[in-house]
Image (cartoon, coloured by chain):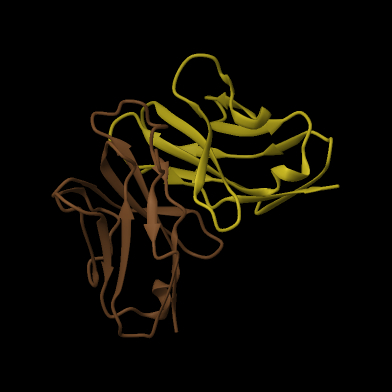
């Protein structure tokens, strides 16, 4: 059973371009979470999605950031018109439907976004 | 609001010596507390958790942590450090409802041979 997959692992974008980060949850998992890790900081929750629904986006910046988790395919975190401050590691985690054990949130290896 | 503090950016310890990585938290209600480890260019790996029950919890790789409600602390410990324990350690808290975690800023552990 493959773990949580994220691609690309490294992404370089110029200021003003769009960044698309993909996350494929573990098989059988229908909940996806996105976190951002700025340099020398801990992870900050961004958004929690279930299939086709955004459940909690309280950590998402109000502008330029969006996330989706379609019925088919990976979850996508999209950052429009990137700025240097968006440079960070973005981690995805997934958990099974109806999970009750909070430790059952498995993390992917992350995508490191660098904005030049 | 929930918050987690890890007062030390860096902890250095000699191989074979005991190690402690500190964590204090603030949350209303009963907390779920976690420790994760992050190796270079890798995602977070779960180490251990406290939900309820015994205050001393044992986890992976010989790590343990002690929940202290009066001091709102959840320090990570290991009796004898290994060089391979060198990594970034994150403490996290989750409310007993809701699905997202709040992570501390991390503590970099260096175990010197």
Q: Which chain is yellow?
A: B
Q: Position of residue A50 (x, y in %)?
A: 20, 44
* Residue at left offset 25%, top offset 53%: A58
From where the camera sits, is residue B43 visible? yes
* Residue at left offset 28%, top offset 77%: A18
Q: Which chain is brown?
A: A
From where the camera sits, is residue B27 visible? no
Q: In the shown orientation, is residue A58 left or right of residue A39?
A: left
Q: Position of residue B39 (x, y in %)?
A: 60, 51
Above or below: residue A75 compared with residue A85: above
Q: Position of residue A14 (x, y in %)?
A: 38, 85
* Residue at left offset 50%, top offset 46%: B44
Above or below: residue B53 compared with residue B39: above
**Residue farthest top in this picture:** B53
User: In the picture, which quadrant includes the N terminus of chain A?
Assistant: top left
Q: Position of residue A43 (x, y in %)?
A: 45, 53
User: In the picture, which quadrant includes the C terminus of chain A?
Assistant: bottom left
A16 and A110: which is toward the camera: A110
Q: In the shown orientation, is residue B85 left or right of residue B32?
A: right
- Res B89 quadrant in image: top right
The number of numbered discs placed on residues in the rendered structure image is 0
Above or below: residue B88 compared with residue B18: below
* Residue at left offset 28%, top offset 62%: A77
A115 and A25: which is toward the camera: A25
- Res A113 quadrant in image: bottom left
Q: In the shown orientation, is residue B75 left or right of residue A52?
A: right
- Res B94 quadrant in image: top left
């Amino acid at each position: 059973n493959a773990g949580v997959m994220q691609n690309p692992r490294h992404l370089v974008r110029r200021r003003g371009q769009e960044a698309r980060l993909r996350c494929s949850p573990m098989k059988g998992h229908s909940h996806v979470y996105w976190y951002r890790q700025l340099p020398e900081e801990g992870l900050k929750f961004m958004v929690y999605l279930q299939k086709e629904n955004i459940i909690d986006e309280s950590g998402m910046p109000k502008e330029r950031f969006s996330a989706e988790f379609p019925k088919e395919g990976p979850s996508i975190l999209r950052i429009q018109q990137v700025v240097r401050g968006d440079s960070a590691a973005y981690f995805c985690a997934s958990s099974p439907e109806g999970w009750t054990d909070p430790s059952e949130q498995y993390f992917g290896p992350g995508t490191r976004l660098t904005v030049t | 609001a929930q918050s987690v503090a890890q007062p030390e950016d860096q902890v250095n310890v000699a191989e074979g010596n005991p190690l402690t990585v500190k964590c204090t938290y603030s949350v209303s209600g009963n907390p779920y507390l976690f420790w994760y480890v992050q190796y270079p260019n890798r995602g977070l790996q779960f180490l251990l958790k406290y939900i309820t029950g015994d205050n001393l919890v044992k986890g992976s790789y010989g790590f343990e942590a002690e929940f202290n409600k009066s001091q709102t602390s959840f320090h990570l410990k290991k009796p004898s450090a290994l060089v391979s324990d060198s990594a970034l350690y994150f403490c996290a808290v989750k409310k007993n409802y809701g699905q997202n975690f709040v992570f501390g800023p991390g503590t970099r552990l260096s175990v010197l041979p």
